[in-house]
Image: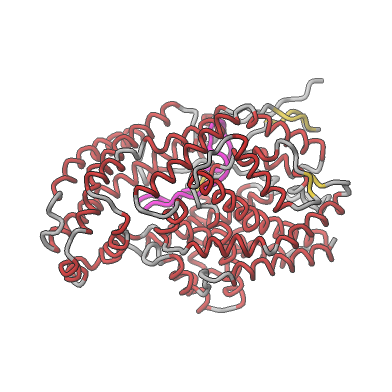
Amino acid sequence: MEKQRETIPARSEIDKRYTWNLSKLFADEAGWEEGLRAFEGLLPGIERFKGRLGESAATLREGFDFMNTVGLLEERLGHYAQLRLSEDAGDSRNQDRFARFMAVASRAEALASYQTPEIQAIPDETMASYLSDDLLRDFVISLRKILRFKPHVLSASEERLLAMQAEASQTASKTFGALTDVDLEFGAIETPEGLKPLSQSSYSSFMINSDREIRKTAYFRFYEGFDRHKNTLASLYAGSVHLDLYRARVRNFPSARAAALFPDKVPETVYDNLVATVGNNLDTLHRYYELRRRVLGVDKLRLYDVYVPLVKDIKVTHGYEQAVDVVIPALKPLGDEYGEQLRAGLLGGWVDRFENKGKRSGAFSAGSFAGDPYILLNYKEDVLRDVFTLAHEGGHSMHSWYSVASNPFQHYNYTIFEAEVASTFNEELLAHFLLERAESRAMRAYLVGKEVDDIIATIYRQTMFAEFEHVAHRMVESGGTLTVESIRTEYGKLLRKYFGPEVAIEEVSDLEGLRIPHFYHAFYVYKYATGMSAAIALSRRVLSGGERERNDYLAFLRSGGSRYPLESLALAGVDMSSPAPIQAALDTFREKVHALEDLL
């Protein structure tokens, strides 16, 4: 009898109860179309303030208020279009909607490009009087941030030219997404339950399968897909890096990395501290891989062996609602308001839960001022990591919820550096909760192993990605070229460095350097590692503390974009300008590896 082939459902086959409710953004597509027309109608008003922003505090305030009106509508339109594209990138209507929004948004950005140079041209004495004027009190933070960019802002005409490139500059990233999320086909894998489709989303499920042959087949089949398109992928990534370098040079930054870190006011030493500290602690990682080899009973550990749970015969399954019932009690240290609001959102329209054909892989949270803080998942009930992903994305969404509730539109939006703290903090609380309730030694070992794997994924692995990004950009900045060969060579060196001599690196493994979507948002991934390090410190502070420590943390969530990230984290209780939190997190990793050795 032929085994039934499992297929990924089309978007139309997903029950509406399991999809997000975007009505707070727009009630329907007709409402979005009306909003787009209204947005276009606002564009001529942008030029009304050209050459006038320095006239008086009143004129400057009027200009800011008008741009808030434009910005609020633009954000609603953009979030709706982006979320619809994320739910099904293969739907031409979603592609068309997003493209039309970007066309109008690019025009708005070009029309408004005079504003920052014009504000920066206001004489210092006049600006000092504006900063002390009650009329501009709500915009002092925005003004100070604008003034900080003064050495890196061009003339109004040059800014307009750069703004006009906004849509075209997304080509590499959009093409990468279309290729890897929609066009790439990986086929299906034979399993005891029948043929199962291999995709970007299901790949992680195959990598934790207890059958080594299934893992091996899925691993090589997956990279065969990328191998068929390696030249296209290398060309896309090289184009993205060249664009990063172009943007940095025209804005008078010494490097692409310096340009990327400047908006958050994060010194490059923070990045270097991370890479150096992790590099000095690779011995524990290599020790763990040797432990993994022994427990799995293989002669040589391979890259398709590094994710499968080390504790056998423990089946952990959570339906989506069951996962919510686990996550909410785990977050009780954050208070009733936090838990009640998050539960209502997770069950009431914030979340697009399950995989469908054309849906973006992975997970994200997308907060906005007018809408709910929406969450995209590709939830699978047999993957414990997906319960942690739910807690993780819930952390992002509650960060957005508190930020919107506590700040005006002009500075509610927090940085990614801070966001990765709020999300990973929730994962830390969930791990603590589950460990306290583990009913057997085997379950405890399973959970400690999960914690170990999470630190590897979030600190070690993201630091490896961060090191690669720095290497790739420096190659181009020094006159070198990014080709299939050079990318694979440099990425291969890092694979051998991080996995150590006891792990076999396959011939196709360095193709991984061509498939990481975050590389198209340069110098982003290091924030996962710094975020987890801060989250470990802050979660221990809250768990061992009381109301004061909880309130300090909630104040951090409420701060939004009112402070720079190192400042807001210092107020919450952790100094990320120092390598100490990184080292403390890696010390925790060492303790967890020793505990796992004892438990196994």
The picture quadrant where one finds residue 152 is: bottom left
The residue lying at 63 percent from left, 65 percent from top is 277
The residue lying at 37 percent from left, 32 percent from top is 99
The residue lying at 69 percent from left, 62 percent from top is 434
Depth order, front residue of 208/156: 156
**Could you say where residue 8 lies in the image, as x and y percent from the top left?**
62, 30
Is residue 430 shown left or right of residue 236? right
| Residue 309 versus residue 131 in the image, above or below | above
Depth order, front residue of 574/338: 574
* Extreme residue in the top direction: 1
Quadrant of image for the C terminus = bottom right
The picture quadrant where one finds residue 558 is: bottom left
**Could you say where residue 552 lies in the image, as x and y percent from the top left?**
48, 74
The residue lying at 31 percent from left, 44 percent from top is 74
Quadrant of image for the N terminus = top right
**Could you say where residue 235 lies in the image, as x and y percent from the top left?**
52, 33
Residue stretch rendered in magenta on the structure:
351-374
Q: Residue 353: within the magenta?
A: yes
Q: Residue 552: within the magenta?
A: no
| Residue 276 versus residue 296 in the image, above or below | below
Q: Main secondary structure of the magenta part?
A: loop
* Extreme residue in the front direction: 479
**Could you say where residue 269 lies in the image, as x and y percent from the top left?**
51, 65
Is residue 123 shown left or right of residue 549? left
Q: Count how many numbered circles sit on residues in the image.
A: 0
